């Protein structure tokens, strides 16, 4: 090969879900049971028919094939503001929102505005793997706050404070957590923002699964000074089951958005118009539908928690909530990757290895049960029990 790769990109792991799915080619052809996919965190239900019909009505309009403003259509951003007002009790202004290609692109915009190569971002373990991958690709050093299984990985302010250096640019957290499902309490989020403010850094909070939290996730938007240090990342793809539409948002001070749009224009220009109209329709019409799905997912989670712990099951549930369960596997001599591969090949069960969520997490596995129907949970748990006894 005649060219060199960026050393920043070379150090990044291959996409974990793609890696796990590649193992399926190694399964024996005969006698395979039905595949149970606990790997990717996507809703297993489609968007409502009325949303799809609304988009079909729009598709013939030639305007839908054109660019929108980089930050998104103002009328869509106003609908998003109204959604925040209902669900958080207070809301950003339209000029404080940039609509993005999923939460992943919102994360990239935030990090590129905040950081230079060589800077540091404090990341709570277990960490969402795309965050670590993105930081490494940018040459930004993730500084990991250790995982405490006793509290399900909730952040400890005293520990976070000890990790700060002159190179620290942000605290990066996810609530509800991907991979544990743990929800950071509103009072802790308030304290995290105060800590960020004291040290002159940003609190970057990824709230991709905020629609699956009972009650208000926090009250930061009611703080008149929230813009000084708070950066919020959202994914309406999970909320309205539009993951393929890539409906994300970056919420921050208007001056932050101004700089983010410089990257937005050179990266993607804008979120597709059709996605924006889907987002506006969802924000305007689907609160009751979202609430029903939140209740369904809670029932699914509760059923899993009822079935999984048993004397026969050597896999131990460490934390769970919403879409996820964080499990300790029983094989001391196997890494999480080796354990997950064994499960794929011997039990036709797809899960993600713990180490893709950060260093030192080889004893763990992530399960995502948003992708399977509740009727499959007994069979999934039975496969854990059977494989753990081998």
Image (tube, rainbow, N blue to C red):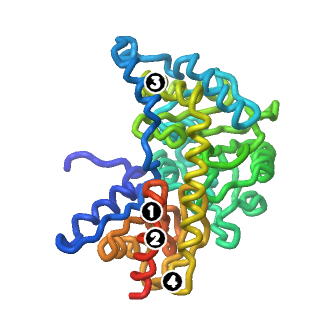
Label 2 crowd bin: few (<14), some (14–19), many (20+), radius 10 Å: few
| Circle 2 residue | 378
Q: Which of marks 3 and 1 is in front?
A: 1
Pointers 3 and 1 in contact (C-beta within 8 Å): no
- As drawn, the label of residue 314 is 4
Residue drawn at x 68%, y 28% as measured from the top left: 253
Upstream in sequence: badge 2 or badge 3: 3
Upstream in sequence: badge 3 or badge 4: 3
- C-alpha span from label 2 to label 4: 16 Å
- Rendered location of residue 256, percent (x, y): 64, 29
Upstream in sequence: badge 1 or badge 4: 4
Q: Which of marks 2 and 3 is in front?
A: 2
- Residue 311 found in image quarter: bottom right
Residue 128 is at least partly visible in this image: yes
Residue nearest the viewer, comparing 343 with 353: 343
| Circle 1 residue | 375
Q: Which of marks 3 and 4 is in front?
A: 4
- C-alpha span from label 2 to label 1: 7 Å
- Residue 123 found in image quarter: bottom right
What secondary structure is marked by label 4?
Answer: loop
- On the rendered image, what quadrant is the C terminus found in? bottom left
- As drawn, the label of residue 270 is 3
What secondary structure is marked by label 2?
Answer: helix
- C-alpha span from label 2 to label 3: 43 Å
- Rendered location of residue 240, percent (x, y): 51, 38
What secondary structure is marked by label 1?
Answer: helix
Label 3 crowd bin: few (<14), some (14–19), many (20+), radius 10 Å: many
- C-alpha span from label 3 to label 4: 48 Å
Label 4 crowd bin: few (<14), some (14–19), many (20+), radius 10 Å: some
Label 1 crowd bin: few (<14), some (14–19), many (20+), radius 10 Å: few
Residue drawn at x 50%, y 31% as measured from the top left: 100
Pointers 2 and 1 in contact (C-beta within 8 Å): yes
């Amino acid at each position: 090969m005649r060219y060199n790769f960026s050393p920043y990109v070379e150090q990044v792991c291959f996409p974990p879900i793609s890696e796990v799915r590649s193992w399926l080619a190694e399964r024996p052809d005969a006698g395979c049971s039905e595949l149970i996919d606990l790997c990717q965190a996507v809703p297993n239900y489609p968007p409502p028919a009325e949303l799809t019909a609304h988009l079909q009505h729009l598709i013939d309009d030639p305007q839908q094939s054109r660019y929108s403003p980089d930050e998104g259509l103002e009328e869509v951003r106003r609908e998003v503001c109204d959604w925040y007002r209902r669900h958080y009790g207070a809301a950003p202004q339209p000029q404080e929102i940039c609509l993005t290609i999923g939460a992943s692109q919102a994360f990239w915009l935030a990090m590129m505005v905040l950081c230079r190569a060589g800077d540091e971002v404090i990341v709570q373990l277990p960490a969402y793997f795309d965050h670590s991958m993105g930081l490494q690709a940018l040459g930004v050093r993730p500084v990991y706050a250790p995982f405490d299984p006793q509290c399900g990985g909730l952040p400890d302010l005293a520990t976070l404070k000890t990790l700060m250096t002159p190179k620290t640019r942000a605290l990066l957290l996810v609530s509800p957590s991907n991979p544990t499902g743990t929800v950071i309490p509103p009072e802790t989020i308030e304290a995290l923002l105060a800590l960020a403010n004291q040290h002159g850094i940003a609190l970057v909070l990824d709230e991709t699964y905020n629609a699956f939290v009972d009650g208000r996730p926090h009250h930061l938007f009611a703080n008149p000074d929230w813009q000084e240090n708070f950066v919020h990342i959202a994914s309406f793809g999970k909320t309205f089951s539009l993951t393929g539409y890539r409906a994300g948002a970056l919420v921050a001070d208007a001056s932050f958005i101004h700089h983010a749009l410089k990257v937005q224009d050179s990266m993607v220009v804008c979120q597709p118009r059709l996605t924006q109209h889907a987002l506006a329709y969802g924000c305007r019409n689907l609160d009751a539908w979202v609430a029903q799905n939140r209740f369904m997912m809670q029932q699914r989670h509760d059923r899993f928690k009822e079935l999984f712990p048993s004397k026969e099951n050597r896999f131990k549930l460490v934390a769970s909530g919403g879409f996820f369960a964080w499990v300790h596997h029983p094989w001391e001599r196997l890494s999480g990757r080796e354990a997950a591969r064994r499960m794929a090949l011997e039990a036709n069960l797809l899960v993600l290895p713990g180490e893709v969520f950060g260093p030192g997490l080889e004893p763990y596995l992530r399960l995502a049960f948003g992708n399977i129907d509740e009727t499959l949970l007994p069979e999934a748990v039975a496969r854990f029990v059977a494989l753990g006894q081998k």
